[in-house]
Amino acid sequence: MNAIMHNHKSILLLLLIVTYNLSGQNPYFNKIDKSTGLPSNTIYDITQDQKGFMWFATNEGVCKYDGVSFSNLSTKKVTSKAGSSLVVDNNNTIYYCNFDGYIYYNKNEILEPVPQNQPLGYSPIGILNNKILTTEKNNIIVYDINDLKIIKKFAFNHNTFVTSTRGDNCYYILSDCLYKIDQNLKIEKIKLPEELNNISEAKLLKYGNGKLYFFNKYRQSYFIFEKGSFKKHYLPIPENIIQNIAFVDNQIWLCTTNGIFKLNDKNDVEHWFKNHNISYFFKDSFQNYWISTLNEGLFLIPNLNTKLYQFPETISQFDFLEDKLLIGTVNNSIYSFDLTLHKQQKIHKDLDNHEIYLLKKVNDYFFATSSQFRVYNNKTKLILEKKVAVKNIIPIDHKYFGVAASGFCGILCFDTKLKSEWDTFYNIRKKEKDVLNEARIESNIKAKSIAYNPVNKTIYISTNLGVITQTFHEKKTLFYKNKPLYINHLNTWKNYIFGVNANGSLIQIDNQNKIKTIPITSEEINKIKIIRNHLFIITKKNILLYNLSNKTKIEILTNNQEFDVTDIGELNNQILFATKKGMIAQNLEDINLIHNQKFILNHITINDVDYSQLPKTLSFDQNNIKFNFSVLNFSTSYSNAISYKINNNKWYTLENNSRKLILNELSPGTYQLEFRVYNPSIQKYDLLSYTFEIKPPFWKTPLFLSALLAFIFILCYLVFKNHVKKINLRNKEKLEKVNLENELNKSRLTAIKSQMNPHFFFNALNTIQSYILTRDNKKALYYLKKFSVLTRNILETSEKEYISLEDEIKTLELYLEIEKARFNENEFFFNIETQISTQKESIKVPAMLLQPFIENAVKHGLLHKNGIKKIAIQFNQHKEYLTISIEDNGIGRKKSQELNLLKRGNHISFATEALMKRIEILNLNQNKKISIQYTDIEDSLESGTIVTIQIPI
């Protein structure tokens, strides 16, 4: 029995060795690590959310990747950063569990904790529909995804817990038995085989392909649970620590400390990435493959069929010799290499380590240049060796070769017996001392590249003096825009010559020597190579394939400093790329595989408030809008620029490949906003379009404007009506004023009449006559003179509304002088006093206003008094008023009224009525009015009247 077991183990070991030796080459990959922005080179888990972003659980926490940059989630609330078990729920929320066993979820780029009691340590998270499942002490916990509240608990023995996983709409927990919880939260306990019941061993549990797999990190055997039964299997791999299991493309991928093993249903295995510590393997929705490592970051594999053949030396140039590769290295070595058998044979090796910068098979020869120029036949036998720096060599026809070298350019041949149409040119130019037995086109120049156009039978040579052309009979220099043309890397396709100028632009020369620039890429071109109808363009970032027949372009490889593509070739339906890492082989049918690019809007910020979608309608003050985008294209490091246009305006490109567009102070109106980004895989633009309207403020709406117009119309009507009313009022006031002026004129006439009273004139003239009759000529002349002056003053004053106080006092003095003559001498006395600070000439009083009051004092008060008759007139200024006091010692108003009643009855003096009417007119529409106050003096010794008049100054 022991012998049988021993033989069985030997056969198994032999099978493992044979199978393992059949492992393939590593796929071509792009390395992403801390140098490219990854927070840590230690990666534990990978997932992708529903939008397409990649998520990584690293030693520094959780980060998100959009193909260009990483954003690390805030870890201020976590107990430790390192963790794994990245899962995505139906709401596109990311969850992960750190190695302390605490679960967190992403909320606005911050890791928020899920409420837990006592976690058991790290346990993979399970999500079933809208539920989250995990373990804690003595319980299996079920949370509601929407509010993270516990909705159910299952009791279990936490001391026997091993691990858990999700699959087939169920959550599996490996413990003292296998717990199976379905989406309806029904639990089933499944008994384990005795070998799986050992809880002390490090087990891995994974669901895939409709089966549940039980792996042990350190054993070569594993179990499959299917249809209610367990079956044991053996792994055909050497002993390695298995760290994780992934199911990709319906195959098992074992992630180990010594690379990754692909295991198919037939138990065949491929071993990739030997000596790399692999933690997980993942395939995204864009058909890219991701490998996470524990010390080297991430390996991004665009295509598993694109292989990387590692080589002992760095490849500089290569070409093909039958079904093998001719490889030249930077260490001055030449190898033949069999891709199928992955075997190489050394053809040449120099100790000077000079780079082989030319390795080319032409007809039955192949040529190599390093420190020397060598020619080999098709049996790899060296037939010529010269110390000359040949830069390029091409076939002209079956006999001649075109050669470009440092110092000369021309044509040469190795078999002079052959015939050619270039024989005449060769024989004329041939000289015996030429180093390669060549016929030179030009000497003492630095020739860089050479090409031949068979249509116009012209040789084109790129030199330090420009491009030289040579036909059978003529040599000339090409000019472009009146300047010599400087281009390198000359290639021929049909009747065209292509090259690259110093600015990295593609130049085309047709058979008429017409020159133009071909705008294939905005990147600076380093080198080109034409193979059949394919133009390969090498830039610092990409390798582009341009189909010269149908003018289509596609990106076929990402170029970077790690790989640095130096040469391109085609063999057995494969495109080969020489790089620093080795030879990359890509199947031609895989070139046109579309690696999906996704152009998405992450969020919109309107007035510093985030929105997941752009509202169709915005208020007038919601006019500061910021758009945040991502262009998800992980298969390339090329960052496509985003362009936008508003309405029907021209396209604008965001600066420096920005992923933000900020629109400030947008005016009200309807906007059609379009974005585009070039998709190199499909050679078209990915488009996003948004239509939104910014409403005008309410004061600019049609309803408000209509109401405003109506209001303005009503207001104008009211203003017009008010204006008409004011005009009517002014007209009325003018009419009233005219009437007042008429009344005033009448009052003036009355005052004149009263002042020119016939009794007064009769009395004054009688007095003057009496002086004449008594021959008192002196007095007669005195009073006659005063009478004439008074009469003239009264007539002059009647033409004026206001006169100065000084003129008024003079008139009053004349009047009282004449009245005094009517009385006996030493019987009548008058006194006029002024106590005014202002000049009397500047104070104006109404004309002929005071004289009637003095006349009444004389006529009604003093005339009937016996004895001394006195009248005192006093002018005083109180602020803005002139106060005039007229005091007489006559009989008083009471006795005067009694006498008047006896004479006239109830008749009111015409002069008095006219005076009061005039004062009323003068006071009309005035803030400061003329006032009159009568004071009767009634005591035992004296009687009389005081009239106080206040006139505004």
Image (cartoon, helix red, strand yellow):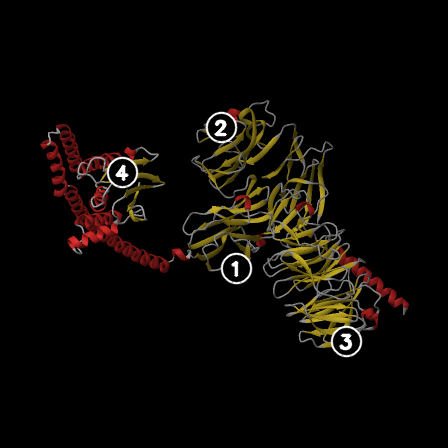
Q: Residues within 10 Å of mark 2 (few under 14, many from 20)?
A: few
Mark pair 1, 2: CA separation: 76 Å
The residue wearing badge 2 is 424
Of badges 3 and 1, the one in the foreground is 1
Q: Tag 2 or tag 4, which sits nearer the N-term? A: 2
Q: Tag 4 or tag 3, which sits nearer the N-term? A: 3
Camera-side residue of 348 and 66: 66
Q: Tag 1 or tag 3, which sits nearer the N-term? A: 3
In the rendered structure, find residue 190 and report the number of the disc placed on it. 3
Say what amino acid the circle numbered 1 marks. Answer: Gln
The residue wearing badge 1 is 613
Camera-side residue of 691 and 209: 691
Q: Residues within 10 Å of mark 3 (few under 14, many from 20)?
A: some
Camera-side residue of 944 and 924: 944
Mark pair 4, 1: CA separation: 84 Å
Say what amino acid the circle numbered 4 marks. Answer: Lys
Furthest toward the left, the residue is 773
The residue wearing badge 4 is 844
Give the structural element (helix, strand or loop) at label 1.
loop
Q: Tag 2 or tag 3, which sits nearer the N-term? A: 3
Mark pair 3, 2: CA separation: 93 Å
Give the structural element (helix, strand or loop) at label 2.
helix
